[in-house]
């Protein structure tokens, strides 16, 4: 999910801003919340405290009222009639306006005076207020449900003593609770004016509500029971100044105890109750404020990250796209460095890299082109795996295999696929050469390709690994066909040899000819002499014949080597020349049972040395005759090859043919297979044809016959 740089940036920024924000916000929110709560509870407690003080004052005042009443001399005078006492306490009730009524009971608990005249004579000795004060002292009762009038009551009582200090009775006014409740209501109103939606109420030690804006609850509702609180928990919460949450009406309450004082021993608790909303609303407002701030920061961060990531990522993305385009071989134009420094550096490097790669690619293509178009065969293969890695066009032609099928094959596999490569490998003894280390090797080897013997020049070298020059990787074979070159060289050597031999022979011939002429002259003289017997004459005949033969050889030698015998070019009619030969040799042919045939197509006149051509043809005819001692067919055929501008003259016999060795040595001076041969005829013929700018080739098979072909360049004669 967070694979892209953009997503990562986003995650990082959110993380970096959000987590600290959350922590800070949580801490501030929490402390503010606490502040609000503390403030609220303090406000409530202070309200409760002030109400408690008001109540304490009220109680104190009422206790003083009663004490004062008990000190009334009329009440203390035991001699006074009860009606006077009644008058006096009625006067008290009227005076103060806070009391509903008052009774005076004698020391036995019997009502003797009553402001309302309703309970006179009633025995109230069991009442708590009577019990509490009959032994002296003063009493402030709890609020209780009167069994007589069936409504909440609060009475005060005080013992009354006569002049002698004897207790003569108890005076007990009943307090007007309306006054107390009014006080509470006033307080509540005051509280509401200050912005607290609550109210004040009173709870006694048993948990009963004794004062409440809703008067129906008074003495009908136990606060502790309703809120599942024990007296202890209630005490504790007061000590800790905790707020009590009343779930039934969702209000928060706090209590303060009204202090006891002499005469007031009740446990009264002033309660302040406010709706929980008063606390939760500011808290909720606070939470909203934080959420709003959070949202705002989130949006701003999001926007900033969006912008920043675009700024960072876009130039990178452009580079990534260009790189992938380049990798897939698409053309990439230089990118403009218009982002920030780092990416600009990268962009410039990228531009430089692509430019260099393109240049390198071009030079690589050029090298490949050279490799493909060269006449040299080039094969490279891996040293260890023997897999072929390079195979150029010349190789494709020579081995008749496509580069695509060969690349990847090992040379062993390729050897099985291509018979030509097989013989190639065999001829080079490549296996032995593979043990070669880094030295290069060059050599020539003959190789039979499709039945034709060719000579190759081979260079074997090793190629180092491209990434590590110390290690060798490929073996490179470069070879070319040098057959033609070698043949030409051979030819050249032979020609040179011939020249030297010719000059040598000419020298010899001259030196030998003169003494030989002298010897022949004298021999002739002796031969003609009468004194010589017939038998001796025969010997002399042989001697003269042999000398003539030597002379013949010398003539031939001179003829061949005569430096003066330069080409004398004239118009030559080759067809005519051949016809002449036919006429000249018909007789001899018949005598040797040889059929002499000539096939001459219409030929153009050429410009050449007729005498020399004549001599060459005669030499070949003579050899053919000598090759057919038992007869045969001699065919001379002459044709024009206009396309290549040559004429060809075939002299074919059905004679003995030549062995490999003879073919090899043909034209070598003095090489002959004949008893009486000179071994100079072929040499002379080769030389003549060569001088004429032509060539002489031979095909021969032992026992079947020989065909010589003279190829002459066509130097046409302009007949007009
Ligand atoms: P010579 O004829 O004196 O032997 P050449 O130079 O004319 O010398 O010939 C050399 C050799 O070439 C011959 O001895 C012969 O063995 C061989 N030769 C030449 N022409 C033919 C031919 N037409 N048929 C067979 N062998 C030939
Ligand atoms: Mg000959």
Image: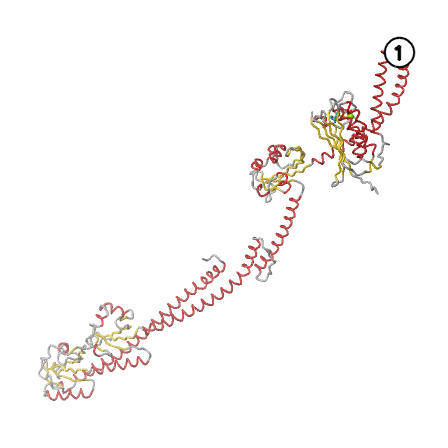
Residue 656 seen in this snapshot: yes
Decide: few, some or many residues near mark 1? Use Cα within 10 Å; few <14, some 14-19, many ≥20.
few
Could you say where residue 360 lies in the image, as x and y percent from the top left? 63, 50
571 is higher (above) or lower (below) than 310:
above
Q: Which residue is mark 1?
A: 532
Instruction: Tell me if the residue at label 1 has its CB under 8 Å from ligand 1.
Output: no
Could you say where residue 108 lies in the image, as x and y percent from the top left? 9, 79
Q: Residue at x 36, y 70 (%)?
A: 33
Could you say where residue 329 lies in the image, as x and y percent from the top left? 58, 53
Q: Is residue 357 left or right of residue 119?
A: right
Q: Is residue 132 left or right of residue 653?
A: left
Q: Is residue 349 left or right of residue 123?
A: right
The quadrant the C terminus occupies is top right
Residue 491 seen in this snapshot: no
316 is higher (above) or lower (below) than 109:
above
Check the image and tell me how it is coloured: secondary structure
Element carrying mark 1: loop
Q: Looking at the picture, tell me which residue is in the foreground, 658 or 285.
A: 658
Q: Looking at the picture, tell me which residue is in the foreground, 346 or 99.
A: 346
User: Quadrant location of residue 213?
Assistant: bottom left
141 is higher (above) or lower (below) than 372:
below
Q: Looking at the picture, tell me which residue is in the foreground, 704 or 304.
A: 704
User: Quadrant location of residue 635?
Assistant: top right
The quadrant the N terminus occupies is bottom left
């Amino acid at each position: 999910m967070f694979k892209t740089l953009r997503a990562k940036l986003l995650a990082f920024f959110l993380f970096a801003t959000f987590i600290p924000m959350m922590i800070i916000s949580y801490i501030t929110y929490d402390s503010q919340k606490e502040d609000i709560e503390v403030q609220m509870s303090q406000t409530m407690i202070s309200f409760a405290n002030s109400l408690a003080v008001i109540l304490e004052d009220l109680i104190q005042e009422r206790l003083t009222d009663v004490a004062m009443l008990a000190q009334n001399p009329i009440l203390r005078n035991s001699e006074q009639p009860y009606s006077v006492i009644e008058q006096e306490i009625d006067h008290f009730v009227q005076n103060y306006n806070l009391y509903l009524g008052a009774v005076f009971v004698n020391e036995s608990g019997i009502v003797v005076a009553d402001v309302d005249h309703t309970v006179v004579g009633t025995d109230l000795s069991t009442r708590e207020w009577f019990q509490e004060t009959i032994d002296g002292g003063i009493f402030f009762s709890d609020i209780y449900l009167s069994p007589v009038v069936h409504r909440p009551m609060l009475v005060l009582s005080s013992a009354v003593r006569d002049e002698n200090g004897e207790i003569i009775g108890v005076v007990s006014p009943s307090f007007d609770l309306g006054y107390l409740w009014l006080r509470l209501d006033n307080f509540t109103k005051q509280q509401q004016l200050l912005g607290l939606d609550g109210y004040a109420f009173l709870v006694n030690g048993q948990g009963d509500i004794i004062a409440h804006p809703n008067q129906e609850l008074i003495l009908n509702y136990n606060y502790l029971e309703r809120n599942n609180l024990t007296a202890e928990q209630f005490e504790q919460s007061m000590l800790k100044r905790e707020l009590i949450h009343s779930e039934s009406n969702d209000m928060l309450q706090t209590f303060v105890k009204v202090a006891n004082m002499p005469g007031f021993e009740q446990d009264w608790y002033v309660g302040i109750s406010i709706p929980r909303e008063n606390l939760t609303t500011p808290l909720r407002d606070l939470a909203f404020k934080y959420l709003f701030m959070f949202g705002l920061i989130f949006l701003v961060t999001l926007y900033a990250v969006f912008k920043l990531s675009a700024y960072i990522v876009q130039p990178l993305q452009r580079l990534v796209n260009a790189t992938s385009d380049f990798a897939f071989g698409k053309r990439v134009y230089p990118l403009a460095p218009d982002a920030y420094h780092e990416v600009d550096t990268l962009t410039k490097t990228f531009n430089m890299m692509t430019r260099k790669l393109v240049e390198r690619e071009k030079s690589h293509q050029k090298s490949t082109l050279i490799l493909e178009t060269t006449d040299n065969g080039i094969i490279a293969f891996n040293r260890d795996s023997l897999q072929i890695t390079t195979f150029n066009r010349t190789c494709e032609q020579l081995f008749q295999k496509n580069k695509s099928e060969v690349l990847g094959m090992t040379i062993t596999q390729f050897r099985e696929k291509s018979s030509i490569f097989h013989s190639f490998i065999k001829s080079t003894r490549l296996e032995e050469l593979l043990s070669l280390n880094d030295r290069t090797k060059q050599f020539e080897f003959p190789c039979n390709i499709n039945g034709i013997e060719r000579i190759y020049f081979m260079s074997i070298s090793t190629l180092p690994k491209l990434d590590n020059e110390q290690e060798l990787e490929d073996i490179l074979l470069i070879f070319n066909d040098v057959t033609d070159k070698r043949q030409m060289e051979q030819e050249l050597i032979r020609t040179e040899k011939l020249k030297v031999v010719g000059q040598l022979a000419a020298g010899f011939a001259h030196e030998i000819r003169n003494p030989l002429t002298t010897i022949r002259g004298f021999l002739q003289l002796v031969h003609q002499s009468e004194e010589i017997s017939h038998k001796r004459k025969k010997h002399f005949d042989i001697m003269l014949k042999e000398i003539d033969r030597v002379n013949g050889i010398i003539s031939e030698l001179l003829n061949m080597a005569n430096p003066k015998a330069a080409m004398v070019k004239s118009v030559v009619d080759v067809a005519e020349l051949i016809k002449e030969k036919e006429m000249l040799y018909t007789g001899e042919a018949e005598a040797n049972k040889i059929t002499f045939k000539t096939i001459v197509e219409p030929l153009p006149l050429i410009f050449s040395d007729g005498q020399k051509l004549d001599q060459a043809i005669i030499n070949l005819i003579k050899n053919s005759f000598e090759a057919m001692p038992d007869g045969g067919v001699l065919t001379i055929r002459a044709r024009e090859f206009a396309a290549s501008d040559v004429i060809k003259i075939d002299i074919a016999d059905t004679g003995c043919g030549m062995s490999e060795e003879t073919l090899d040595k043909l034209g070598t001076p003095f090489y002959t297979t004949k008893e009486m041969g000179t071994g100079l005829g072929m040499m002379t013929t080769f030389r003549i044809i060569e001088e004429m700018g032509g060539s002489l080739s031979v095909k021969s098979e032992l026992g079947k016959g020989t065909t010589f072909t003279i190829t002459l360049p066509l130097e046409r004669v302009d007949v007009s």
